[in-house]
Amino acid sequence: MKHFNHRLILKATSFSAKKHIKQRRKDEFSTPYINHPVSVALVIADIGGVDDTEVLAAALLHDTLEGTETTPEELENEFGKKVCQYVLEVSDDMNLSKEERKVKQIEHARHLSEGAVLIKLGDKISNVKDVINNPPDDWSLNKRIEYLVWAEKVIDNCPKVNDDLENRFKELVKKGYEVLV
């Protein structure tokens, strides 16, 4: 068993909090953005039983390349090649349109490493919870349902790596359809 590196987790949390400091979620409460990456790491640890420090650190950092001025070089220097690779795997190319990014995420899902799949599952679980319970202010019911359909396509294309996370995702999507339709 690998040694659990608390320092790496704390460093990733601090780094992510600093990078996302001015960002807010688009929900009714303008929730601080850092709550989302922390939620993703908690989901994969609590539900998925993940205790791989590098995967958990990457979960905390998973949106830094997309949503902040962070570079891959900076991530690799601070957290190592493996953490950086996980973050790169789950990051969209922000030079593409939103529609192109959504299609690419579905296509790319089947090629993800096990660690990246765990992060993707945690991210989609966290986002689906928000879409059901605390959606962005400007999202119509239809847009919320479209998100569930798209998230299912992404997760369906991922390699199967963690039954507990996959089952939780399916349960949440089912609940979402029941609540929203």
Image (cartoon, grey):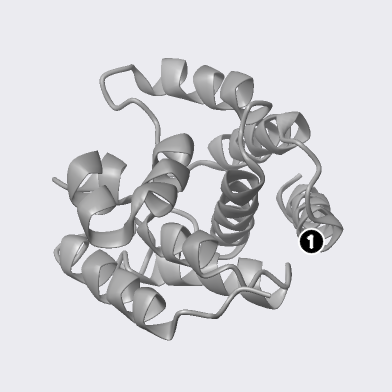
Name the residue that disc number 1 marks: 168
Q: Position of residue 62 (x, y in %)?
A: 40, 52
What is the quadrant of the N terminus in the image? bottom right
Task: Identify which residue, 33 or 72, lies in the foreground.
Answer: 72
Q: Up-down: is 74 above or below 101? A: below
One can see residue 71 in this view: no
What is the quadrant of the C terminus in the image? top right
In the displayed image of the protein, which residue is found farthest to the bottom?
A: 6
**Which residue is at a point 73% across and 53% down the rendered structure image?**
176
Dot 1 falls on a residue whose secondary structure is helix
**Which residue is at a point 61% across and 34% down the rendered structure image?**
112
Which three-letter amino acid code belongs to the residue tagged 1?
A: Arg
Q: Up-down: is 137 above or below 154? A: below
**Which residue is at a point 64% across and 38% down the rendered structure image?**
151
For residue 3, side relative to residue 57 (left or right): right
Q: Position of residue 5 (x, y in %)?
A: 45, 79
**Which residue is at a point 37% across and 74% down the rendered structure image?**
8
For residue 59, side relative to residue 7 (left or right): right
Q: How many marks?
A: 1
One can see residue 42 in this view: yes
Counting other residues with Cα less than 10 Å from the Cα at mark 1, is it few (<14), some (14-19), or many (20 or more)?
Answer: some
Choose top left, top right, bottom left or bottom right for residue 27: bottom left
Choose top left, top right, bottom left or bottom right for residue 60: bottom left
Task: Identify which residue, 143 or 168, lies in the foreground.
Answer: 168
Q: Position of residue 159 (x, y in %)?
A: 76, 36
For residue 93, side relative to residue 36 (left or right): left
For residue 142, side relative to residue 104 (left or right): right
